[in-house]
Image: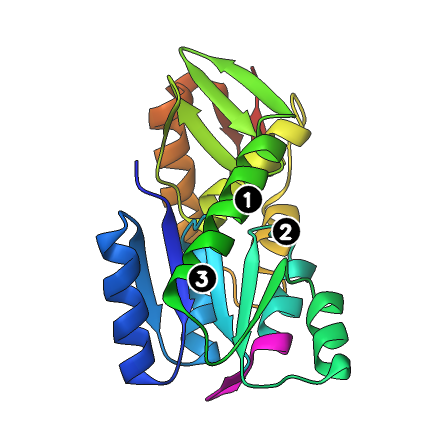
């Protein structure tokens, strides 16, 4: 399965050029041009790498990545920016980025940095995993679910919910606890939670996740 990349770039010409180049290299690229949409995509979908511009409409790359890191999402991130001072570089790494590429840059250099990050991420992700049976394995560092070495597409919240269940086996968690973990300060959705649980049950087994009125959900391996 092709690695999935979120490209956040408000320059349409550059975004199109990078998307076309990485697409030809075999990557699945999702493009957006502002911080608000990028945050929503990063929370709802699972990506292997984020490529983030710093100067963005409706926000900036520093704040965007800080928000995602505070939510516990460890997806590798590369900043692309025309900012070049040591202060900016320091701020970038302090906000949680894994690499920093100054504009203008060669597309080949971006590709090499992506490849390096993916190799490191794969190595780290496979250092701590949990066998869920039936060929399923969950890798904590990467927050990714695999069946027979094939990655299973999950949204960001589905991945977070699965990790939460695995870390709280045989314990009922209230809706409030799950809402706080998955949505934080966002408005939670009970209907969405039910949809996420339904999908995970289809993957793990219907009897693995039980529901009890007044007590919430419980994962029983």
Q: Reply yes or no: does residue 62 show up in magenta.
A: yes
**Residue under pointer 2:** 181
- Are the residues tagged 2 and 3 within 8 Å (C-beta)? no
Is 176 on the left-hand or right-hand side of 21? right
Circle 3 is placed at which residue position? 110
Query: Is residue 142 visible to the viewer in this orientation of the structure?
Result: no
Q: Would you name the residue on which mark 1 appears?
A: 160
Q: Residue at x 56, y 25 (%)?
A: 219
Inter-mark Cα distance, 2 to 3: 34 Å
The residue shown at (58%, 40%) is: 120
Give percent across and percent down for residue 56: 48, 85
Query: Judging from the image, what secondary structure is the residue with disc 2 in?
Result: helix
Q: Is residue 151 above or below residue 106?
A: above
User: Does residue 64 appear in the picture of this structure?
Assistant: yes
Q: In front: 192, or 147?
A: 147
Q: Where is residue 152 drawn, in percent x and y? A: 36, 33
CA–CA distance in space, label 1 to label 2: 8 Å
Residue 36 among magenta residues: no
């Amino acid at each position: 399965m092709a690695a999935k990349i979120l490209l956040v770039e408000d320059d349409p010409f550059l975004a199109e050029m990078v998307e076309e180049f990485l697409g030809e290299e075999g990557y699945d690229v999702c493009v957006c041009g502002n911080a608000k949409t990028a945050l929503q995509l990063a929370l709802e979908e699972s990506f292997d790498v984020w490529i983030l511009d710093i100067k963005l409409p409706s926000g900036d790359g520093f704040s965007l990545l800080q928000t995602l890191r505070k939510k516990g999402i460890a997806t590798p991130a590369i900043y692309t920016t025309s900012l070049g001072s040591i202060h900016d570089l320091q701020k970038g790494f302090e906000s949680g980025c894994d690499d920093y590429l100054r504009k203008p840059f060669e597309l080949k250099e971006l590709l090499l940095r992506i490849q390096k990050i993916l190799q490191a991420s794969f190595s780290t992700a496979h250092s701590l995993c949990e066998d869920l049976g039936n060929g399923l394995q969950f890798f904590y560092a990467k927050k990714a679910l695999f069946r027979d070495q094939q990655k299973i597409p999950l949204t960001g919240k589905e991945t977070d919910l699965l990790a939460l269940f695995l870390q709280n086996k045989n314990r009922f968690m209230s809706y409030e606890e799950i809402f706080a973990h998955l949505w934080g300060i966002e408005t939670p959705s009970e209907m969405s939670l039910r949809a996420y649980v339904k999908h995970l049950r289809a993957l793990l087994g219907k009897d693995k996740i039980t529901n009890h009125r007044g007590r919430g959900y419980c994962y029983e391996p």
